[in-house]
């Protein structure tokens, strides 16, 4: 198999994820954060069922159902709510910068939970990203707390914990299978918002409904299938996960084009520091240096 072929799948995923920030912001006037969360993943679940022959889902053993429920709760139920609540007050580009920190946050959590050692340069890179986050947080309004950012940090930690929890399952099942069943579990939990969501659908414009379908099919179902395919074909995890650093760039471009949302200087300057820290954190040179 051609190992270089992962680039197409990784790039397709990032483009699909990038547009979700912009489209979610676009339809906030017609749907609540909770309704967007449910509708996006009910569409995604239907799409994944349609893709089942391609995914070749393996039956989950009874003793692993609890893990699936937990990963679905943290990685899709809580994550999706935090993600969309954050977008109520945070622009798409800023949100994408925070979520781009997930691989680094996962590694730092692994240091404490699984005792996976981090090098001193990696801690330096983490500090650089943290400074960038402070600039994004503090420059726009002094020391005023933007609760949307707190929601996004919650979303980033949810996805990071999801990554750690899914480790146990990917030893037995393929990553796409774990993700698919976790999405099913998360969708079932999100169904508590189904009544208000369907009521809002009746009042929504056709364009807003189309955005929901677009995110459900491409930003969720297709994106996760492509992401899993990229990991299958790549030589190492970092080569794929590093593509996440392109998300803020594509999100900012799409934000300007679709919703005329221009990121502020605090986001640009802070974002550059965050992404620089993330790139350094995952560079081979920084990983090679021992404490």
Image (spheres, rainbow, N blue to C red):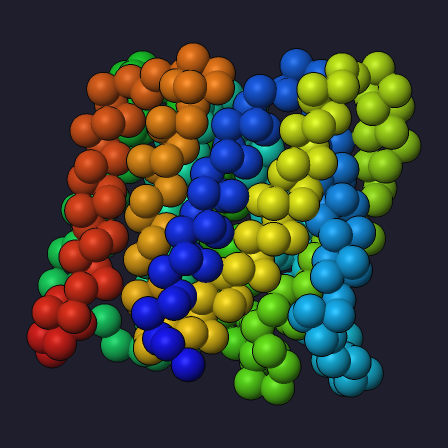
Q: Residue at x 75, y 31 (%)?
A: 35
- Residue at image coords 41%, 38%: 96
Q: Is the N terminus in the top left, top right, bottom left or bottom right quadrant?
A: bottom left
Is 51 displayed left or right of 158 in the figure?
A: right
Which sits in the foreground, 193 or 58? 58
Q: Which is nearer the eye, 144 or 31?
A: 31
Note whether 91 is above or below 156 in the view shown: above
Q: Position of residue 268 (x, y in %)?
A: 24, 27
Q: Is residue 209 visible?
A: yes
Q: Position of residue 24 (x, y in %)?
A: 59, 28
- In the displayed structure, 87 sits above or below 30; it is below
Would you place residue 96 above or below residue 128 in this image? above
Q: Residue at x 88, y 20 (%)?
A: 202
Residue 83 placed where, x, y %?
A: 56, 38
Rendering quarter of residue 250: top left
Q: Is residue 61 left or right of residue 54?
A: right
What residue do we see at 40% from left, 32% from top? 251
Closest to the observer, 253 or 142: 253
- Judging depth in this view, the residue of 163 and 26 nearest the camera is 26
Q: Quadrant of the C terminus?
A: bottom left
Q: In the rendered image, which quarter is residue 230 located in? A: bottom left
Q: How many marks?
A: 0
Q: Quadrant of residue 38?
A: top right
Can residue 154 be seen here? The reply is no
Q: x%, y% of residue 249?
A: 32, 35
């Amino acid at each position: 198999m051609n190992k270089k072929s992962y680039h197409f799948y990784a790039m397709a995923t990032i483009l699909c994820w990038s547009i979700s920030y912009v489209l979610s912001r676009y339809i906030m006037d017609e749907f609540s954060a909770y309704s967007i969360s449910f509708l996006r993943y009910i569409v995604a679940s239907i799409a994944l069922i349609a893709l089942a022959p391609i995914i070749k889902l393996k039956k989950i053993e009874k003793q692993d159902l609890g893990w699936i429920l937990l990963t679905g709760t943290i990685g899709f139920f809580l994550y999706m709510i935090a993600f969309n609540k954050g977008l109520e007050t945070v622009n798409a580009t800023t949100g994408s910068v925070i979520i781009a920190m997930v691989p680094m946050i996962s590694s730092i959590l692994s240091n404490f939970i699984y005792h996976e050692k981090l090098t001193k340069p990696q801690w330096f890179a983490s500090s650089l990203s943290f400074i960038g986050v402070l600039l994004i947080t503090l420059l726009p309004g002094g020391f005023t707390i933007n609760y949307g950012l707190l929601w996004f940090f919650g979303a980033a930690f949810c996805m990071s914990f999801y990554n750690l929890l899914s480790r146990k399952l990917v030893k037995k099942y393929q990553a796409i299978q774990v993700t698919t069943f976790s999405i099913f579990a998360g969708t079932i939990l999100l169904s508590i918002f189904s009544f208000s969501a369907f009521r809002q659908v009746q009042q929504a414009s056709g364009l807003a409904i189309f955005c929901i379908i677009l995110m459900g099919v491409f930003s969720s179902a297709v994106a996760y299938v492509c992401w899993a395919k990229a990991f299958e074909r790549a030589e190492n995890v970092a080569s794929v996960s590093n593509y996440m650093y392109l998300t803020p760039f594509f999100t900012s471009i799409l934000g300007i084009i679709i919703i005329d949302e221009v990121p502020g200087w605090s986001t640009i300057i802070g974002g550059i520091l965050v992404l620089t820290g993330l790139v350094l954190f995952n560079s081979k040179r920084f990983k090679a240096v021992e404490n």
